[in-house]
Image (cartoon, grey):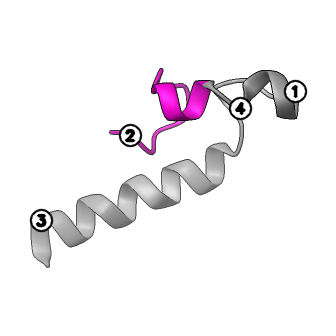
Amino acid sequence: MTALPGNPQIQNAIPIPYFGTNVFAAPLLGLFSAGLMLGLGCCG
């Protein structure tokens, strides 16, 4: 759940002002990471 885009985690929110992004930055990478963690957690 920590990799999903829009998830309000503090480690994701701290660099927002520095990079000028929002919590929905890199949605494809976040969805890929969440799927990978789900797959490895269930079947690994």
Q: Which residues are magenta?
A: 1-13
Hey, what amino acid is under mark 4? Answer: Pro
Which three-letter amino acid code belongs to the residue tagged 1? Gly
Looking at the image, residue 32 sits to the left or right of residue 14; the answer is left
Q: CA distance from mark 3 to mark 4?
A: 31 Å
Q: CA distance from mark 1 to mark 2?
A: 20 Å
The x, y position of residue 18, in whole percent, is 84, 29
16 up-or-down from 28: above or below: above
Q: CA distance from mark 4 to mark 1?
A: 8 Å
Q: Amino acid at mark 3?
A: Cys
Determine whether 6 is above or below 2 in the image: above
Q: Which residue is mark 3?
A: 42
Q: Magenta residues: mostly which secondary structure?
A: loop
Judged from the image, the secondary structure of the residue bearing numbered disc 1 is: loop
Q: Disc 3 or disc 2, which is closer to the eye?
A: 2
7 is within the stretch colored magenta: yes
Eye-nearest disc, 3 or 4: 4
Tag of residue 20: 1
Q: CA distance from mark 4 to mark 2?
A: 16 Å
* Amino acid type for the residue under numbered disc 2: Thr
Residue 30: image tag: none
Residue beneath label 2, please?
2
Badge 3 or badge 1: first in the primary sequence: 1
| Image point (46%, 39%), residue name | 4
Residue in view at x 12 percent, y 65 percent: 42
**Tag 4 secondary structure:** loop
Sequence order check, earlier mark of 4 and 2: 2
Q: Position of residue 25 (x, y in %)?
A: 71, 36
Does the CB distance between marks 4 and 1 fall below 8 Å? no
Report, in whole angstroms, how far the alpha carbon at label 3 lies from the one at label 2.
16 Å
Earlier residue among tags 3 and 4: 4
Identify the residue at horizontal 87%, vertical 27% (top origin).
20
